[in-house]
Image: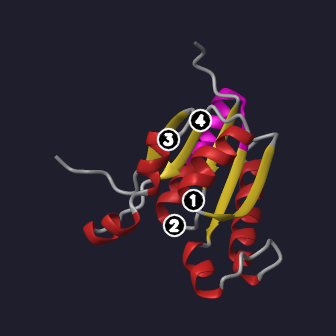
């Protein structure tokens, strides 16, 4: 068993928690001299229900994600990460992150933010980070946006 990470997958969605997870992934990639993979999943579940059309990478719905990934890639490279790869794809974030891309990239660590859902949202959608933790083939670090006080 090794304690080194070679391929770190950071899931980013533009939220505050994902921003913190991205910053943590830079620290970890530097410490482990790892390749950093940045993934933005455009959640198309509601979109496809309404339009019956699966968007492709050229559709406008992807523009914000492309801009976010471009910004993060530049920031990671400026921080000294020699290899940064970016990916944007449609689908269910729960499945795409924990199964598809974790396996495809041979990730040994996934870094994601803990999204704060209220009880009703959690009941309807479930927690993406909780699903990633329970179904990923590798280690998972969930970064929280606020520190809990004693």
The secondary structure type at the circle numbered 1 is helix
Residue at x 44%, y 41% (from the top left corner): 134
Could you tell me how far apart the alpha carbons at marks 4 and 2 are, in whole angstroms? 20 Å
Tell me which colouring the rendered structure shows: secondary structure
Could you tell me how far apart the alpha carbons at marks 4 and 3 are, in whole angstroms? 13 Å
**Badge nearest the viewer, 2 or 3:** 3
Could you tell me how far apart the alpha carbons at marks 2 and 3 are, in whole angstroms? 22 Å
Which numbered disc covers residue 15?
A: 2
The secondary structure type at the circle numbered 3 is helix
Residue at the outermost top position: 1
- Residues in magenta, as a range: 24-36
Could you tell me how far apart the alpha carbons at marks 1 and 4 are, in whole angstroms? 16 Å
Q: Residues within 10 Å of mark 1 (few under 14, many from 20)?
A: many
User: Against 14, is 96 above or below?
Assistant: above
Q: Earlier in the sequence, mark 2 or mark 3?
A: 2
Residue at x 57%, y 59% (from the top left corner): 93
Marks 4 & 2, CB-CB < 8 Å contact: no
Left of 122 or right of it: where is 107? right
Residue where numbered disc 3 is placed = 135
User: Against 79, is 116 above or below?
Assistant: below
Q: Nearer the viewer, residue 14 or 123?
A: 123
Residue where numbered disc 1 is placed = 93
């Amino acid at each position: 068993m090794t304690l080194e990470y070679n391929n770190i997958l950071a899931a980013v969605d533009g939220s505050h928690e994902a921003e913190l997870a991205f910053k943590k992934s830079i620290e970890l990639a530097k410490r482990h001299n790892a390749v950093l993979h940045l993934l933005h999943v455009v959640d198309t579940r509601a979109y496809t229900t309404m339009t019956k059309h699966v968007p492709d990478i050229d559709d406008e719905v992807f523009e914000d994600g492309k801009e976010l990934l471009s910004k993060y890639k530049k920031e990671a490279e400026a921080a000294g990460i020699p290899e940064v790869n970016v990916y944007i794809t449609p689908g269910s974030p729960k499945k795409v992150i924990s199964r598809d891309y974790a396996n495809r990239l041979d990730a040994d660590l996934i870094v994601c933010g803990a999204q704060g859902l209220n009880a009703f949202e959690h009941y309807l959608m479930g927690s993406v980070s909780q699903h990633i933790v329970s179904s990923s083939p590798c280690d998972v670090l969930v970064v929280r946006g606020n520190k809990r006080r004693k």
